[in-house]
């Protein structure tokens, strides 16, 4: 045992100690048997803290009654299970499990995050508190990790907080910003990173097109009556899903729907073809494709698509930016991250600890330790 004693509160090194106390610390279980260690812990009369404090031991967690390796074991379990389930499995208090997991996640971040200097960032928001509030998530799209969680809403001021967090030097390092078409995010990006190109997320653009297709579905359902309605009723998921994700029965239902309704068939085929826009290597060819797609809408009686084309025109620069070779970044990461966030939000429903949510988001794509 070292003669020097480190204050567990402030980290001050002392040459002597005040007294010794025996503490019972829980360690990893052996099978069904719970293991407890009897540990002699020294205390110091710390002048800096002006209190008697226990010494710091690296192998004991922030909760002094549990070992660090037990805390890490709890953290690993919580990556795939709820706090409630882990607490029940290990016979621990719910709050204890949550705090041990927080220590695990903080260590994950400490080991991975140095100075934040991303070159390509993705900006998205997540709904908290039943969708009444939003928080912003910024990800490094080259390293495929979220790097910031914060803000109070989706405002320009909240987005500015990220750039203030990383500083002016790191902000100048950003060359490309991927986002949805939310104006507040765009204004903040242009203000804080004027050198960076702005690219609108393909998935958000296609979501607008899917919403337009759904409006056409509703219009057809309202227009039709009797037996013609039965082909449309309850088919929203079938119509809006990617064909590749449908089961054999789903594909059969889709074929029946499109055969029965010519207007929906036309709208569906146009929606499916629009994804080709992101395959072009130059803006000129992308523009030719879009103009041809837009011209094909004439005489088709699908007004929601006319509104969609106007949306694309207003945001063309941010959509066409993807045609440049240097901007061909993988956009699937953001959707994958959103899916993970939704999973642990459901698992932790009712949890009001925002610091816990922040840690869950920032560690959601990190490897376990």
Image (spheres, rainbow, N blue to C red):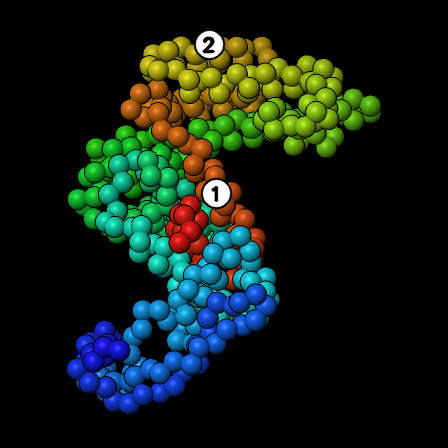
How many dots with numbers?
2
Secondary element at image label 1:
helix
Q: Nearer the viewer, residue 310 or 5?
A: 5
The image shows residue 126 at horizontal and vertical percentages of 46, 47
Q: Nearer the viewer, residue 262 or 165?
A: 165
On the rendered image, what quadrant is the C terminus found in?
bottom left
The residue under the point 41% across, 42% down is 124
Residue 215 visible? The answer is: no
User: Do callouts 1 and 2 mark residues in contact (Cβ within 8 Å)?
Assistant: no
- Apparent side of residue 48 relative to residue 111 in the rendered image (left or right): left
- Apparent side of residue 215 relative to residue 128 in the rendered image (left or right): right
Q: In the rendered image, which quarter is residue 328 located in? A: top left
* The residue positioned farthest toward the right in the image shown: 226
The residue under the point 52% across, 10% down is 296
The residue under the point 55% across, 16% down is 270
Residue 105 visible? The answer is: yes
Around disc 2, counting alpha carbons within 10 Å, would you say few (fewer than 14), some (14 to 19), or many (20 or more)? few
On the rendered image, what quadrant is the N terminus found in?
bottom left
Q: Earlier in the sequence, mark 1 or mark 2?
A: 2
The image shows residue 138 at horizontal and vertical percentages of 36, 44
The image shows residue 338 at horizontal and vertical percentages of 48, 43
The residue under the point 30% across, 35% down is 120
Secondary element at image label 2:
helix
* The residue positioned farthest toward the bottom in the image shown: 19
Marks 1 and 2, how far apart in space? 33 Å
The image shows residue 209 at horizontal and vertical percentages of 52, 26
Q: Which residue is mark 2?
A: 292
Q: Which residue is mark 1?
A: 338
Q: In the rendered image, which quarter is residue 304 located in? A: top right
């Amino acid at each position: 045992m070292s003669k020097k004693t480190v204050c567990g509160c402030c980290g001050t090194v002392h040459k002597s100690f005040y007294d010794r106390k025996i503490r019972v610390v829980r360690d990893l279980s052996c099978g069904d048997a719970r293991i407890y260690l009897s540990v002699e812990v020294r205390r110091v009369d710390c002048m800096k803290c002006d209190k008697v404090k226990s010494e710091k031991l690296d192998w004991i967690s922030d909760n002094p009654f549990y070992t660090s390796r037990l805390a890490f074991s709890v953290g690993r379990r919580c990556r795939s299970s709820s706090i409630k389930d882990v607490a029940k499995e290990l016979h621990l208090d719910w709050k204890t499990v949550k705090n041990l997991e927080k220590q695990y996640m903080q260590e994950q971040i400490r080991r991975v995050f140095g100075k934040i200097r991303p070159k390509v960032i993705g900006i998205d928001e997540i709904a908290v508190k039943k969708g009444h509030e939003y928080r912003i998530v910024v990800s490094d799209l080259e390293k495929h990790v979220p790097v910031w969680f914060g803000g109070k809403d989706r405002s320009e001021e909240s987005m500015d907080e990220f750039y203030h967090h990383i500083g002016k030097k790191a902000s100048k390092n950003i060359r490309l910003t991927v986002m949805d078409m939310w104006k507040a995010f765009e204004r903040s990006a242009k203000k804080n990173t004027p050198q960076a190109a702005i690219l609108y997320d393909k998935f958000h653009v296609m979501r607008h097109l899917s919403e337009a297709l759904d409006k056409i579905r509703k219009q057809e359902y309202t227009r039709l009556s009797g037996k013609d309605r039965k082909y449309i009723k309850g088919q929203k998921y079938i119509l809006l899903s990617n064909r590749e994700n449908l089961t054999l029965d789903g594909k059969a239902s889709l074929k029946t729907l499109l055969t029965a309704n010519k207007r929906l068939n036309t709208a569906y085929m146009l929606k499916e073809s629009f994804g080709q826009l992101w395959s072009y290597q130059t803006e000129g060819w992308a523009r030719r494709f879009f103009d041809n797609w837009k011209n094909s809408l004439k005489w088709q009686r699908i007004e929601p698509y006319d509104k969609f084309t106007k949306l694309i025109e207003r945001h063309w620069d941010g959509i066409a930016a993807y045609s440049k070779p240097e901007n061909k970044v993988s956009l699937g990461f953001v959707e994958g991250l959103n899916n993970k966030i939704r999973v642990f939000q459901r698992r932790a429903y009712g949890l009001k600890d925002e610091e816990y949510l922040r840690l869950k988001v920032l560690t959601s794509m990190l490897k376990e330790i």
